[in-house]
Every structure is written in C-alpha cells, then in structure tokens.
Amino acid sequence: MTTRSWAEMLTAIEERLVAGTGDGVAAWSARVRETGLGTEPEVRAWLAERGITGYGQMLLVMERFGYPDFLTATADQLVDGQYADRPQLRPVYEAVAAAALGLPDVHLQARKGYVSLVGPRRTFAVLQASTRTRLDLGLRLPGREPGGRLLAARSIGNGDCSVRVPLTTLDDVDDEVLDLLAEALAANR
C-alpha cells in the first residue's frame, strides 16, 4: 500500500517554493540564518514580507527551529503508531485504504493522528482511529446531512469532513461504504 509521509509532502512543498521564488529550501534557509532573527514570529514576519506564506513558510520555520518527530517518521511508522493500541482496527483501516487506492488518482497521506485520502484536487476523506474500538471514515460531502449511518463529523482529521461513518469490524466495510468513498471523491474533483 502506498501512503505518503509528511517527509514526502515536504518535497512537494519545496517544489512549490522553487516555482514561486526561484530558490529552494537550502538557499532560503541560509538567508533566514543570515538575518540573525531568533524567534519564530520574527522569522514568519520576515518571510511574509518576501511573499513566502503558507506551507513554504512552515517548512522554512521548521528548517530554522527544528522538525517535530512526526514529520521525520515514515508513513508506515505513523500508521503503526495509530493502531499500536488498537490492533483489531488495523484490518478495517487496511480494507478501506485498499478500496480508496483502487479509485482513480487517489493516494494516501499519513499524519500523526489520521490518514488523508487525497484525490487530484484535495482531501476527500479521512481515516481516523477515534477510539480504541472505532475507526471513523470522515467524508467531505458538501450538502450531505447526517442521517442513517452518516453521523456528524466533529473532530475528524483536518476538520473538512462533513459526515463520518463509524467502522468497528470488517463487516462494516460494505458496498454502502465503498459507494460513499466514490461519491466523496467525485464531489471533490
């Protein structure tokens, strides 16, 4: 199964930095060090004055002040950590992840507490082991209201999911769940 780690995402962020400024992380990191600025707010302000905001700014701040452990972990290490104390949910995660990867133009991005399912345009779903006995499949389905198996998606992933489906066993990963995955992907193309 192919899941991207944050480290792999950093490569994509650097590519955007180069496209936007003409220089990569090494050149910008050297400039940041040369300023002698010693606090994160000072560095952020200095970068913003030069048009570097968002992920590019985040990356350069981490270059200056250090990366969190979860950004240096591999995707497998992140996912292993999510299921270390709930191994019975791992097969449920694997089934949904495999189904998502079977959809066109989908990849997975591991985070510290969840895995994003990303289509060509943006994240369309999230897999999050919310409790020791439940994996939530958060879905970005604009206009869909909770009802039936679809519950409100509070505190799922990055907050962009409108509804969630609670999953506790492999039997819960049925045709309805697979159809909802495909619907969420189509709604976010």
Image: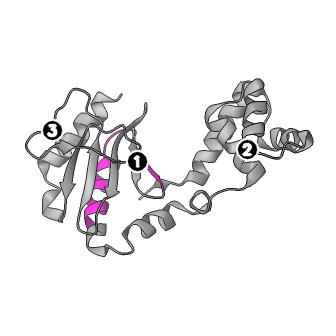
Give the extent of the magenta segment. 91-111
Q: Looking at the image, what colour scheme do you see?
A: one colour
Amino acid type assigned to the residue bearing label 2 in the image: Glu
Residue 182: give x, y in percent of width and height.
Answer: 24, 38
Q: Nearer the viewer, residue 159 or 142?
A: 159
Which residue is painted at 43% across and 30% down in the image?
A: 121
| Residue identified by numbered label 3 | 146
| Residue identified by numbered label 2 | 40
Residue 181: give x, y in percent of width and height.
Answer: 25, 42
Amino acid type assigned to the residue bearing label 3 in the image: Pro
Which residue is painted at 61% across and 53% down in the image?
A: 7
| Residue identified by numbered label 1 | 116
Residue 187: give x, y in percent of width and height.
Answer: 28, 28
Amino acid type assigned to the residue bearing label 1 in the image: Ser
Q: Nearer the viewer, residue 13 or 70?
A: 70
Quarter placement of the N terminus = bottom left
* Res. 36 image quadrant: top right
